[in-house]
Amino acid sequence: MNLNEKIEKLKREKNAIILAHNYQVDEVQRIADFVGDSLELARKASQVDASIIVFAGVDFMAETAAILNPDKKVLIPSRIASCEMARYLTPEIIEEYRKKYPQAAVVLYVNSTAECKALADITCTSANAVKIVNSLDEDTILFGPDSNLARYVAKHTDKKVIPMPPSGHCYVHTNIDVENIPRNGVLLVHPECPEEVQSIADAIVSTGGMVKFVAKSDAKRFIVATERDMVARLRRDFPDREFVPAWNNAICLGMKQITLEKIYRSLRDEVYQVKVPEKIALKARRAIERMLEVS
């Protein structure tokens, strides 16, 4: 048997399911039972009927799945598949901002640790951030950890949105240079990109939103300003269209820690299990489930 066949065999034997983010390499996306953006994966994680969830993504995504599935074994194939953005925000920073703005609501991007989510009023993803913020009664929003997404949300609400911290960002999106972006196609831009990149976009959308945008568009060529392997998903879904990364070096090193070999080992040996302390998980689950209800 080849590696794919071995993985499929283990999935059947262990009643396992593989969830993969859009930024995974093509061969990982193809072996997955479901591929999506953070919101779609959070929804799917809350609905799966499986004993084991193998998460082909980064740590905060696997944590979210574990929080939503306390009765299931959640595995991440690599211990170092992490999100650099999440490190910009700590529980101490949240407490500091809460003291300064006691009447504000705390909205946390899912790209944050479980400990931080436990202190949030509600979470959000890039797909629903504007909707989440506009659903709240509070006039002031403490939004973290991505400052570019915070500024994007601020433009689409009457509320005061305060980035928390002011410098939080994704290095993949922040390093996409507006001067080097090809202009010979419809430009799809992720809201984690800097404002100058957003300003030239034909559409500012999450990765899931990119799929939906292309499905409704008559255009044949798209420039994709996000992690470069998003084009693998788009090319697979729309083989009659052309997709070009806005920057070929837009690579999330955390996502690229996941390989077919590591997925196989993770399933075979049931490593590495993601566990969130019950007290933290309970509080974080409330914030995540509130997001899912609003969405």
Image (cartoon, rainbow, N blue to C red):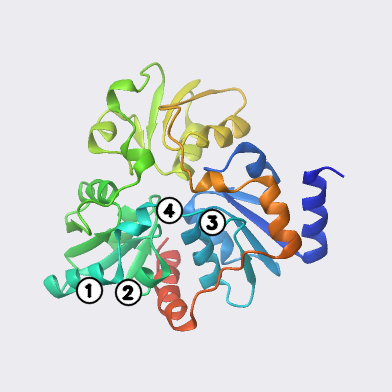
Q: Is residue 226 above or below residue 285?
A: above
Which residue lies under the disc numbered 3? 41
The answer for how far apart the CA atoms under marks 2 and 3 are is 22 Å
Q: Amino acid at mark 2?
A: Leu
| Image quadrant where one finds the C terminus | bottom left
Cβ atoms under marks 2 and 1 closer than 8 Å? yes
Q: Is there any visible trace of residue 219 in the rendered image?
A: no
For residue 137, the mark is: none
From what the image shows, is residue 239 above or below residue 271?
above
Answer with left or right where residue 111 lies relative to residue 141. right
Labels 2 and 3: the sequence-earlier one: 3
Spatial separation of the CA atoms under disc 2 and disc 1 = 8 Å
Tell me the residue at 39%/52% (across/down): 84
Check contact, mark 3 vs mark 1: CB within 8 A. Answer: no
In the rendered structure, which disc, 2 or 4, sits on the residue that comes first in sequence? 4
Are there few (<14), some (14-19), or many (20+) residues within 10 Å of tag 2? some
**Residue 44, position as x, y percentages in the image:** 58, 60
Q: Which mark is residue 95?
A: 1
Q: Earlier in the sequence, mark 3 or mark 4?
A: 3
Mark 3, residues whose alpha carbon is within 10 Å: few (<14), some, or many (≥20)? many
Q: Which residue is mark 2?
A: 119
Q: Nearer the viewer, mark 2 or mark 4?
A: 4
Q: Secondary structure at mark 1?
A: helix
Mark nearest the camera among 3 and 4 is: 4
